[in-house]
Amino acid sequence: MDKQELVRGLSAAVGAENVFADEQTICESSKDYIGFRIFERADGKSFAPRAACVVRPHTVEEVSRTLRFLNENRVDVTPRTGGSSVTQSIEPVEGGVILDGSAMSGILEINETNMTVTARCGTPLEYLENALNERGFTTGHFPQSLPMAHVGGLVATRSTGQFSTLYGGIEELVVGLEAVLPDGTVVRVKNVPRRSCGPDLRQLFIGSEGALAFVTEATLKLFRYRPDERWMRAYAVADMRRGLEFIRAVMADGYKPAVVRLHDAAEVMMVLGMSEAVPEGQALLLFLCEGPRAIAEATGDAVAEYARKFDAADLGGKPVEAWFRTRNDVCRTLDNGLYHEMGVIADTCEISANWDEIGNIYDAVVARLTGEVEEMAYAGGHASHCYAQGTNIYFTFAFMEEKGAQAAEADYMRVVAIILEETLRRGGSVAHHHGSGRYRTRFMPEEHGSSYELMYRLKDALDPNGIMNKGVLLVERK
């Protein structure tokens, strides 16, 4: 099916006003914010695949008709909503169709009795939070992509937020959802607090990255919004190892600060710009506790007691306040070309592991990045999502790219391969909350081990024609 025939068929299915084949719309809708693509764009080049057209449905019925048409004609489709991906998960297949849910926006219900909110897939999270805050509620979900992210993408990528240590990731917040399967079938998982009626079907779609279905609606938990009842404190600790021990003690004893962040000395200087507040060479711990005042203060008092046990220097609340004010600013500067002007590719890669290996992973990765990559200008990391069993490390790095945009992807993949290899070697997971995207797909067999075959069987059952977000999650079988 050529492009003209495809556009005509889609226009007949969902209306010509919902189908876009112009270069500007296709280019904007294909944009991903992985580091090497940002560098390429700043260099005036694009090596990303190009879709044939973009479909922007306004209703679940239009999503259904679109997918039915594409499935019958075996046309590749890439779902997207807010477009904040940093993993190539929303880059299209060459000549395929982008199914953009951003026009499906709106809050359908705020149920104050059941403490839930139901929103359509294209609802911006920032808009949703503002509307809820005005009524005294919050989702408790604050990813760094808050200014860009939409509800559908958060569900599809198994997102988590900066307050996840208290509220949990999106998988713990979704009460029910609606999704459209590749053949156009609309399915709904009803909203109940819990049930014991077989496997939890919500989890088929949460984290599926558009490879199994298109999520059109989600119902999320609500919490009381208490911004004036927060406890904040920062501490300096000797190094990352000591900081990880501090956090493990807090979590193992059952305390739940909303925010726990441990930044290594490199990030204190290069990312946070707080070197004057933290003794040279030391790591920085940030805590924010919230909830009813008595709970927030009791949790804070416990954190302060652990600080004394671990010889952590109390830096007061100002470093936390400074981080809080600027925590999402990166969303407004992603494509400003600053790093390209310096000849640098900068990015992050987040992994997770149990407590007995997370420190070893951090040490091994930083040692290899600084020792093996001659162009490495900076390598560091932070822990920011903590559990009784372990935590994540969000590695941050910047390397000089002197060979130009054409070499950016290969050089970038050499860097992230080091991070993911060391993580898998020590039993960790190669993706904590961004989703695996496309750049991590080749690591998925080792990530899942013997259970990986189940991923193929799910794909074959729900998407037998293989049209949905090809290249995500699954290595193509020959």
Image (spheres, rainbow, N blue to C red):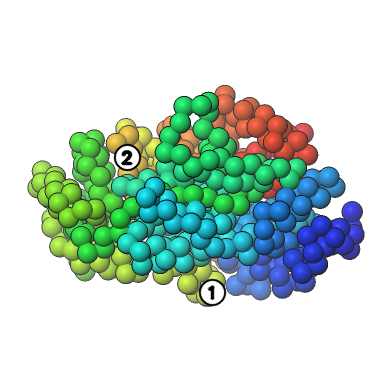
- Secondary structure beneath dot 2 equals loop
* Residue matched to label 2: 387
- Taking the view exactly as shown, the residue that stands out farthest to the front is 113
Q: Nearer the viewer, residue 60 or 249?
A: 60
Tags 2 and 1 in contact by the CB under 8 Å rule? Answer: no
Q: Nearer the viewer, residue 455 or 342?
A: 455
Q: Nearer the viewer, residue 7 or 90?
A: 7
Give the spatial CA distance, label 2 vs label 1. Answer: 36 Å
Could you tell which of marks 2 and 1 lies nearer the N-terminus? 1
Give x and y (percent) for residue 159. Answer: 47, 50
Give x and y (percent) for residue 450. Answer: 57, 24
Callout 2 crowding tier (Cα within 10 Å): few <14, some 14–19, many ≥20: many
Q: Looking at the picture, does residue 81 appear above or below residue 45?
A: above
- The answer to whether residue 374 is visible is no
Give x and y (percent) for residue 7. Answer: 84, 62
Identity of the amino acid at label 2?
Tyr
Question: Which quarter of the image is occupied by the C terminus?
Answer: top right
Q: Nearer the viewer, residue 372 or 216?
A: 216
Callout 1 crowding tier (Cα within 10 Å): few <14, some 14–19, many ≥20: some
302 relative to 25 in the view: left or right: left
Identity of the amino acid at label 1?
Gly
Residue at horizontal 39 percent and vertical 37 percent from the top: 353
Residue 450: numbered disc: none
Q: Looking at the picture, does residue 259 appear above or below residue 337?
A: above
Question: Which quarter of the image is occupied by the N terminus?
Answer: bottom right
* Residue matched to label 1: 337
- Viewer-side label of 2, 1: 2
Residue at horizontal 10 percent and vertical 43 percent from the top: 309
Residue at horizontal 48 percent and vertical 35 percent from the top: 424
